[in-house]
Image (cartoon, rainbow, N blue to C red):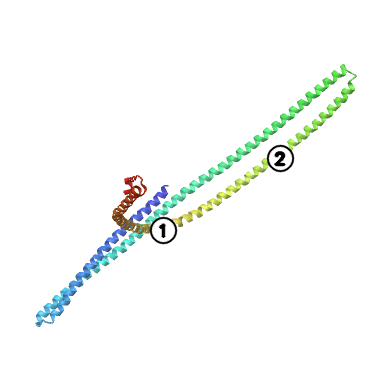
Amino acid sequence: SAGTEDVTLIVVQQDDRENHRRVAEESRRQELRGKLLAEAEHSARRNATVAMRWADLFSVEVPQELCEEVERQRAQCNKITASKDKLISEIKNELKAKDDEYVKSLKRQAEDIDQLLLHMGQQFKDLQGAYLEELEEIEQAFLSQRGDLISANKGDINVLFEKRHTLEQAFMELMAERAAHYQTELERHRVNDAEEYNILKIRLETDVQNLEQHLEAMRATYQLNTEKLEYNYRVLVERDHENQSTISQQRRKIARQRESLLALKSRYGDSDKRYQDENVRLTDEYRRVTEQFKDLQAKYRHFELADIRKFQEVWAMNEETVAAKVKRVLHADRVMHEQQLGLTWHAPSDDVFK
């Protein structure tokens, strides 16, 4: 993201400034070391010259000449002292420059930290807005699912009631048609055949009993269907309560996730600082290991070339000896075939000597 790129850019710029500062510091250190060595060598020569002149002064007897020689010695000593004072002044100026550079570095670090804090705050606001939008979408999805579920349940209940009403209406019509049909048949048989009235009456009573049993069975079925519908309705109500409970649990879970987010952000800050320090340390370690690896590669190439050269020398030294021995063995084999066995000897191919 843009916030992460800004933070990374600040870290990279800080590392680049630090690298340039170290290179410049090493250059100034080498230059100052060279000046110290040159000054030490020059002072040593002057001190040796002055020390040698002190021995010559004992042979001077004229006071004026002695005074002039002493003044010359004093002038040489003053030059040595002035040279050392100049070097001391340069070192003091270098220390002052180091202090000023340290103060500037602290200011730059403070500015970088302010920039990092600003970018981190912006990232936090962006993440907070994104999580709030995601939370709103989740709540809207839950509400939409709840509405769809309630609508689907109401539709199922209405379909069941319509089906029940249709079955009851068809049953009543069927019973009415059967009763009318039986009444017609009864009248027809009563008119047509009075003698069979009793038999028909018995049979019709039997049919009536069967129909009554069938009616009881249908009533039992109706009661069973009614109980099933009531049970389904209670199940739907319980599911609605469970959905409400699930929504409450999801809201509590979202609250816990927010708390976890705050804890993770805090841990991220600590981890980021620790990883930056670890990155600096690993960078130095990587450079050191890289130098060692390059040195090891150079040594490996050197020993590899030496081993190849030795192998070729040994191979060339032993190749002629082995070829001579092979020829002797072939000659003995030919003699055995021709003289002892009386067989024709066939020379092997030239691959034997390769």
> Residue flagged by tag 1: what amino acid is it?
Glu
> Residue flagged by tag 2: what amino acid is it?
Tyr
x then y, percent, for residue 253: 57, 50
Where is residue 194, by image quadrant? top right
Res 354 seen here: no
Answer few, some or many: residues within 10 Å of disc 1's Cα (few below 14, many 20 plus, some between 14 and 19): few
Q: In percent of the image, x 31 and y 59: which residue is there? A: 22
Q: Is residue 269 above or below residue 224?
A: below
- Secondary structure of the residue carrying tag 2 is helix
x then y, percent, for residue 332: 33, 51
x then y, percent, for residue 42: 19, 70
Disc 1 designates what residue?
Answer: 278
Q: In percent of the image, x 27 and y 60: which residue is there? A: 27
Q: Is residue 346 above or below residue 285?
A: above
Q: CA distance from mark 2 to mark 1?
A: 66 Å
x then y, percent, for residue 41: 21, 70
The disc label shown at residue 125, or none? none
In this view, the mark in front (2 or 1):
1
In the picture as drawn, the residue positioned furthest to the bottom comes out as 61
Where is residue 204, by image quadrant? top right
Mark 2 vs 1, N-terminal side: 2
Q: Which residue occupies the foreground of this view, 1 or 186?
A: 186
Q: Which residue occupies the foreground of this view, 261 or 316?
A: 316
The disc label shown at residue 231, or none? 2
Q: Is residue 188 left or right of residue 90?
A: right
Answer few, some or many: residues within 10 Å of disc 2's Cα (few below 14, many 20 plus, some between 14 and 19): few
Q: Which residue occupies the foreground of this view, 41 or 67?
A: 41
